Structure formats: structure tokens, C-alpha cells
Amino acid sequence: MALDQDGVTLPRLRPTDVARRGVIFGLLGVVPLVVATLSISGHSDRREFLAVVSGLVGVFGAGSLVVGAGFWWASAGDIRRLRDWRTITGQAASATLVGPVFLRSGLFLLVLGAAAYGLYHLVDAAPYDS
């Protein structure tokens, strides 16, 4: 990878690359969610677990996505990777790292929340003792 004159890794991050990675992480996070759901024995307990997970994760995901998009917009052309932490020269420059982290986390949580919501409807439609 190439470095610019400040030591920042080139090419700079693009929102589509960050979003793609967040969605992939979210899809990988569905596996532990399914395992956790299958480990809960009661039908109503499964429904309640999935409802709570989908609600909380969805709210935090939407909030993280908005915060990440705001920081991305605020640091316009100077978006940095976490490995570029050593190139930060001032306190305000750390905002250039926050945008991608929150954007990726928000998309991860939104995908996980949507999966939990879908699983909730599957469990809800299943017979009671299945």
C-alpha cells in the first residue's frame, strides 16, 4: 500500500467499501444469533429474546449509522483507517477515524437486527412446541 506525505494509507476509504464490510460482518453475526436462539428452550422465551434483540440492535444500529455518516461528512476528504492512528496530529483530527468505525458498526447492527426480526417472525409462525 502506498502512503501519502503524512503517512496515511492510500487509497482513502470509500463509503461503499466500508458499507460492504459492515454488511458482511452483519451476515457473519447472524450465525451466533441463530445458535443463541436455538439454545433457548421455551417458545415464548425465544420470541421475547428475538424481539428484544431486534429492537435494541436496530435502534443502536440506526444511531451508529447516523453518527458515522455525520462524522464522515464532517471530515470530508480526510477519511483514515484505524491503522492510520499514528498519523493523527491533533485532537480534532481523531474525528477522521470515527466516521468509518461508526458507519461499519451501524450497518453491522442493522443487518443483525433485521435478521433477528426475520427470525422472530419465523419463530412466531412456528407451532408452539416445535
Image (spheres, grey):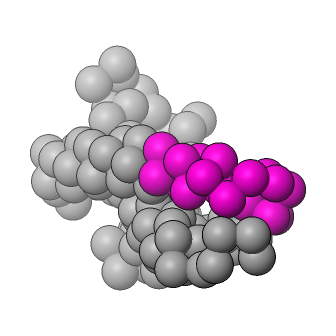
Q: Where is residue 17 in the image (x, y as percent from the top left)?
A: 44, 78
37 left or right of 8 in image: right
Give left or right: position of 111 versus 59. right
- Percent from the top left, x then y, of residue 98? 38, 41
Vertical position of residue 80 compared to residue 24: above or below: above
The one of 72 and 122 positioned closer to us in this rendering = 122
Report the residue at 38% width, 31% height from top.
94
- Quick one: 18 or 10, which is closer to the camera? 18
In this picture, is 90 found above or below 94? above
49 in the magenta segment: yes
- The structure residue drawn at horizontal position 75% and vertical position 70%, both measured from the top left corner, is 129
Q: Would you say 78 lies left or right of 29 here? A: left
Q: Where is residue 112 in the image (x, y as percent from the top left)?
A: 52, 64
Q: What residue sits 31% from the left and 45% below the top? A: 59
Quarter of the figure with the N terminus: bottom right
70, 97: nearer the viewer: 70
Residue sitting farthest toward the top: 91
Left or right, 43 with respect to 17, comes to right
Q: What stretch is highlighted in magenta?
A: 35-53
Residue 44 lies in the magenta stretch:
yes
Residue beneath the point at 55% across and 38% down:
85
Q: Tell me where residue 32 appears, x and y as whole percent.
A: 77, 62
Res 71 quadrant in image: top left
Q: Is residue 22 among what the camera can see?
A: no
Q: How many labels does the image show?
A: 0
